[in-house]
Image: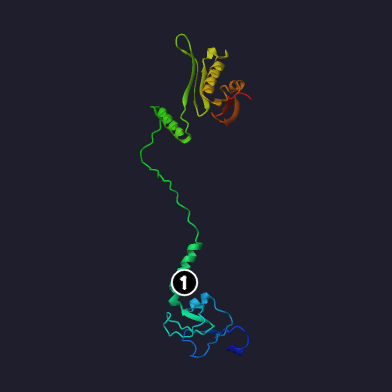
Amino acid sequence: MGRPTRPPRRPSHIGDRPRRSRATVDASGGAPPGEVPTTTWSGSPRRQSWHDRALSGQHSREVELPRPSRHRLADGADGGSERLDRAGTKCVARDHLAATEASLAQACSARYLKHRPQRRARSSKTLHHAVVTNDPITVSDHDDGLAASLSDRINEFNTDATGFDDGRWLRAAQRGRDGSLEAGLAGWTWGGCGYIEFLWVRADLRGAGLGSRLLEAAEAEARARGCAQVVVSSHSFQAPGFYRRLGYVEYGRIQGYPRGHAQVHLVKDLRPAE
């Protein structure tokens, strides 16, 4: 494609607005003095993008100059570029990329900071790393106070986790004149709930209602302590039917505990019926 011809110039007396000419100044020094530069095509009508101009080592921008000025800046007066200014015209100045790479870097940095993903704020919670020791682990069938020690530590943890520190033992017993144990119940109350761990009646006294009186006494004490329910576990070969007759409801069962039998879990609501 050849160089496009410039359209004929309109007389200055035609029209109310002064005519504005567009000039293109190349990096080699521009047009001769006194001539209006023309746009030069390099064989392709496609306009170069800012990325292509950056790769070619040049950067173009359009600037609007003041109307009354009429002068020409010498080479090097504005950072190595030449600017042609005429009254009422818009000029196109082509600067070297080296003169503006600092501004480009600043613009790219600002754009990255604007669009980069936000980092999640780190938690202020302190992480505690577990300490692994090589101390030996002993396994035996001898209880040297370990169960009581573990119970104290578990109760301390439960209190810290729930805020309930009202745990109390629940005991009920009947003894003969000689002080021998005839029947007994052991459990606890904590956090509005009672739990029956053991209930035992001597064999020759079973069937006479002694177990029912023990359980009713324990339930009355649990209700007085503010408990709304009592929980008990009984194996299938023990007395799950006994608890059902007294108002307990089965809510779970574990088969094969022990082998060939099951463990039955029951609960009774102590709140008065509405």
In the rendered image, residue 136, in percent from the top left (x then y), is placed at 36, 37
- At horizontal 55% and vertical 17% (from top left) the residue drawn is 211
Q: Is residue 134 above or below residue 4?
A: above
Q: Is residue 231 above or below residue 9?
A: above
Q: Which residue is mark 1?
A: 104
- The residue type indicated by label 1 comes to Leu
Residue 45 relative to residue 130: left or right:
right
Query: In the depicted view, which residue is nearer to us: 46 or 183?
Result: 46
Q: Residues within 10 Å of mark 1 (few under 14, many from 20)?
A: few
Q: Quadrant of residue 262?
A: top right
- At horizontal 49% and vertical 16% (from top left) the residue drawn is 173
The reply to whether residue 224 is in sight is yes
- Could you tell me which quadrant the N terminus lies in? bottom right
Q: Is residue 109 above or below residue 144?
A: below
Q: Quadrant of residue 212?
A: top right
In the rendered image, residue 56, in percent from the top left (x then y), is placed at 49, 79
Residue 46 relative to residue 106: left or right:
right
The reply to whether residue 141 is in sight is no
In the rendered image, residue 185, in percent from the top left (x then y), is placed at 50, 20
